[in-house]
Amino acid sequence: MRLKKYIVTVDIGGTKTNIGYFYNGKLEKIKKYPTDKFGPNNIRMITDILVNSKIHILAICLSLTGLIDKKGLWSPINKKTLGDFKNFPVIKSLGKTFGVPVYALGDTQAAALGEMYYGSGKKLKNFFYLTVSTGIGGSVIYDRNLFDNKVSDIGSVGHSVIKFNGKKCGCGKKGCLEAYSSGNAIFKRSRSTKCKNTKDLLTKFIKNSKTIKIIDEATSMIVQSMININMLLRIENFIIGGSVGLNPFFYKMILDNTKLADNSIKLHKAKLKSKPELYGCYVYINKKLFLSKS
């Protein structure tokens, strides 16, 4: 009997962690868990889950919010999301336990790869993937290749300053896009509406005048950032993803404000919804394991 070996892909987001199990090129199942507020605890949780699953693993790839270097050392950008730690050895930790190839990349890099091969980016030569969720991030696909973040940190768009001396961001700077337009930011601004969370705000309170004003301001700032990216990189295609970005009301506001500001920008909804990072990790593993040997 042939031994069933899985490629395991993991996405650690600001609020939830997804583990995907790929076999023979197909995503067989996804397991979802709440993300611990201290980043390294999630690596320990994933280790325990995979050890207890008793499955045979071919390789592992992680999609991480924050900064991940070539050695697999992980650090947060916004310490309010995943705590205060620096250079946690993700690859070494999992590699030592499972004895298989382990890879790691940024969450928006993984999402961009996933959308390029399986989603809205299939027919696009160049695009910017922009995720709006707990936080805000992005990644560039240029000439059907992932833009090298050693050249530029353009993917850290959530921490580009959109308002001089503005609100303090979790990264320590003032006036970042993430401090105004992320899921966390719009929820904080809407507390007087008595909504329970960001999802509640964008479903039950969309006719509230204060909600409309908050979302209009948040999406206007996102559009302003897209215009700046378009000017810097000459990229006009933007794929919008993330739980907040894909909310129908929020996405329509981005679309409406884009039409008002710059008709050269073309918006696309992410097709993979909550799974682009898992598919992107699968693509990344295949490139590393198989294409590098050809």
Image (cartoon, rainbow, N blue to C red):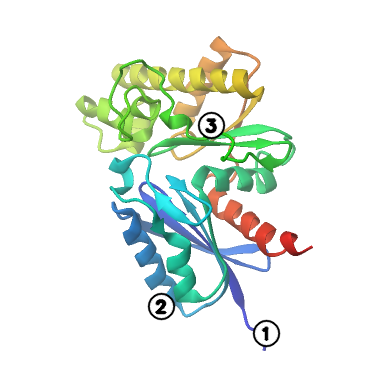
Q: Nearer the viewer, residue 268 or 13?
A: 13
Q: Earlier in the sequence, mark 2 or mark 3?
A: 2
**In the rendered image, which quarter contains the C terminus?**
bottom right
Identify which amino acid the numbered label 1 is placed on. Answer: Arg
Q: Residue at x 44, y 72 (%)?
A: 50
Identify which amino acid the numbered label 2 is placed on. Answer: Asn
**Does residue 287 show up?**
yes
Q: Residue at x 61, y 17 (%)?
A: 231
Q: Residue at x 31, y 24 (%)?
A: 174
Question: Badge 2: few (under 14), some or many (20 or more) residues near its Cα, within 10 Å?
Answer: few
Reading the image, the residue beneath label 2 is: 52
Task: Locate residue 38, reporting x and y percent.
Answer: 29, 53
Task: Locate residue 125, reporting x and y percent.
Answer: 74, 35
Reading the image, the residue beneath label 1 is: 2
Indicate left or right for 249 with 139 as reference.
Answer: left
Circle 3 — which element?
Answer: loop
Q: What separation in Å lies between label 1 and label 3 (alpha carbons)?
A: 45 Å
Indicate left or right for 173 with 238 as reference.
Answer: left
Circle 1 — which element?
Answer: loop
